[in-house]
């Protein structure tokens, strides 16, 4: 009965105009108020589409012909792009991507945050928006009796056999393909998701962009990794840049890539990389920004907005392994970082020691619990920096920040929607948005990072 309420029918062909893009890069068209989602279209384009599925409130279509193309349209260079779920907007020009990401931030601030009249700066992009990722993690499977190695098709768990990825660093792209060939030649059994059998689930590689050091991680279903000596020899003899080879064991039926246990098979437990003049140790499961070039841009902007002169006390909520904290510590009197993950705090302390930074204090816990305790100890921040996960800041943390009356709040966001929601609360609490800077950390995808400066309104 639900399908009969739609103003369109399955297999019907229509001429439509696309008005928006969804989070997965599909274009949106409206037919008598009924939304249709069509992969491959761009806002402002007219096209012929075919309806492929209808539901009560929305449906899906297939793009047949673009009758009026957007000026932002370009030909995607990647041969896997039409199927692969890794990138969503390769069909938008580089300039168009930057403009569109600025529009996403602007629209969310107005629609969700109720913040009109805010100037959003042009998005800071890359000179070369390809081959920027310093990490690749490739699923392995059996498909049609064959070894399958590549990324998943859009909205599926079917793997596209791939021999390169155009947004990944060329060296680690090559390293994982070499690991694949060795695994295939030695008949290391790929993981079978349906039967929960097999050995090899994923191959991950990461590189220190400034140091050139490479780590390879084999994710397996059980403790055993057959032919591991052959794998190690084949990789290390060919690639002297490899400094660490590890095995992660994930025995669960899960979509999560990593399990809880990691053991080093060869070399060091970590590789090293630098952001600015700060060196970080990166282990197999460490979180480290995947675009080091734009990370420097992002953190540089956060440091600029913090406006440090050397006399300020700074709190860094969601500090992770101390990446932003240590940047701030170079310019602040003292930085206090808080993070709920104990391993991250341990890494943050080690990174501070490694870089001889003594004016940074790190504590495990929830920001909304630890920061009030710091306040009770007499710690009064001049600046608070937050870099929360996609869900944004906890409401109690927002209240805590407002109660502590810092002069400035620097909000680093990976989700414009939750950013807008949180800015609305901070504005109601006596803060004013001063600057908004989008940064393109993930070219060819719809993700956008944003740095916002807020100042307390003097009453």
Image (spheres, rainbow, N blue to C red):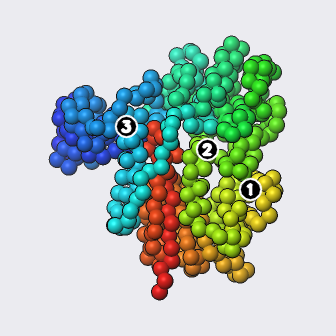
Q: Secondary structure at mark 2?
A: helix
The alpha-carbon separation of the residues under discs 3 and 2 comes to 23 Å
Q: Would residue 333 be seen by someone viewing this image from the given angle? A: yes
Up-down: is 181 above or below 111?
Answer: above
Closer to the camera in the image, 49 or 274: 274
Q: Is residue 407 left or right of residue 22?
A: right
Reading the image, the residue beneath label 2 is 292
Estimate the x, y position of residue 191 in percent, counting from the top left: 63, 26
Up-down: is 138 above or below 148?
Answer: below
The alpha-carbon separation of the residues under discs 1 and 3 comes to 38 Å
| Marker disc for residue 392 | none
Up-down: is 144 above or below 62?
Answer: above
Q: Is residue 264 left or right of residue 419?
A: right
Which residue is pictured at 50% across the width and 42% down the height? 126
Which residue is pictured at 51% across the width and 59% down the height? 451
**Image depth: mark 1 or mark 3 in front:** 3
Closer to the camera in the image, 283 or 253: 283
Reading the image, the residue beneath label 3 is 92
Estimate the x, y position of residue 435 in percent, counting from the top left: 46, 64
Estimate the x, y position of residue 333 in percent, counting from the top left: 72, 71
Q: Secondary structure at mark 1?
A: helix
Q: Secondary structure at mark 3?
A: loop
Alpha-carbon neighbours of circle 3 within 10 Å: few (<14), some, or many (≥20)? many
Outermost residue, bottom direction?
459
Reading the image, the residue beneath label 1 is 348
Outermost residue, top direction?
185
Up-down: is 321 above or below 129?
Answer: below
Closer to the camera in the image, 438 or 13: 438
The alpha-carbon separation of the residues under discs 2 and 1 comes to 18 Å
Which residue is pictured at 75% across the width and 65% down the height? 360
Alpha-carbon neighbours of circle 1 within 10 Å: few (<14), some, or many (≥20)? many
Closer to the camera in the image, 119 or 366: 119
């Amino acid at each position: 009965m639900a399908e009969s309420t739609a103003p369109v029918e399955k297999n019907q062909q229509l001429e439509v105009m696309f008005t928006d893009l969804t989070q997965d890069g599909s274009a949106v068209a409206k037919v008598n108020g009924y939304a249709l989602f069509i992969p491959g279209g761009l806002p402002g384009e007219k096209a012929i589409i075919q309806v492929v599925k209808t539901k009560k409130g929305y449906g899906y279509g297939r793009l047949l012909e673009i009758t009026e193309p957007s000026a932002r349209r370009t030909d995607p260079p990647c041969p896997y792009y039409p199927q692969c779920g890794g990138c969503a907007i390769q069909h938008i020009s580089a300039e168009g991507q930057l403009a569109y990401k600025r529009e996403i931030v602007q629209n969310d601030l107005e629609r969700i945050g109720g913040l009109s009249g805010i100037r959003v700066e042009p998005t800071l992009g890359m000179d070369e928006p390809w081959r920027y990722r310093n990490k690749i993690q490739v699923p392995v499977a059996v498909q049609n009796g064959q070894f399958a190695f590549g990324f998943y098709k859009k909205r599926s768990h079917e793997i596209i056999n791939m021999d390169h990825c155009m947004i990944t660093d060329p060296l680690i792209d090559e390293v994982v393909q070499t690991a694949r060939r060795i695994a295939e030649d030695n008949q290391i059994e790929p993981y079978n998701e349906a039967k929960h059998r097999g050995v090899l689930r994923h191959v991950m590689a990461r590189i220190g962009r400034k140091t050139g050091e490479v780590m390879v991680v084999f994710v397996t279903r059980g403790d055993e990794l057959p032919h591991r000596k052959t794998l190690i020899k084949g990789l290390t003899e060919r690639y002297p840049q490899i400094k660490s080879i590890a095995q992660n064991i994930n025995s669960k039926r899960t979509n999560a890539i990593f399990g809880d246990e990691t053991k080093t098979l060869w070399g060091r437990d970590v590789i090293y990389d630098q952001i600015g003049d700060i060196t970080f140790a990166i282990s197999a499961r460490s979180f480290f920004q995947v675009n080091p070039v734009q990370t420097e841009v992002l953190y540089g902007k956060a440091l600029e907005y913090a406006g440090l002169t050397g006399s300020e006390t700074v709190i860094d909520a969601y500090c992770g392994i101390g990446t932003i904290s240590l940047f701030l510590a170079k310019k602040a009197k003292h930085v206090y970082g808080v993070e709920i993950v104990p391993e991250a705090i341990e890494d943050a302390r080690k990174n501070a020691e490694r870089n001889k930074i003594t004016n940074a204090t790190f504590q495990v816990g929830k920001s909304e619990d630890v920061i009030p305790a710091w306040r009770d100890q007499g710690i009064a921040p001049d600046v608070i920096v937050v870099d929360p996960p996609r869900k944004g800041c906890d409401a109690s943390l927002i209240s805590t920040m407002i109660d502590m009356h810092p002069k400035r709040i620097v909000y680093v966001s990976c989700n414009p929607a939750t950013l807008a929601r949180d800015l609305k609360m901070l504005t109601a609490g006596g803060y004013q948005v001063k600057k908004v800077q989008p940064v393109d950390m993930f070219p060819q995808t719809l993700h956008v990072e944003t740095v916002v400066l807020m100042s307390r309104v003097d009453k």
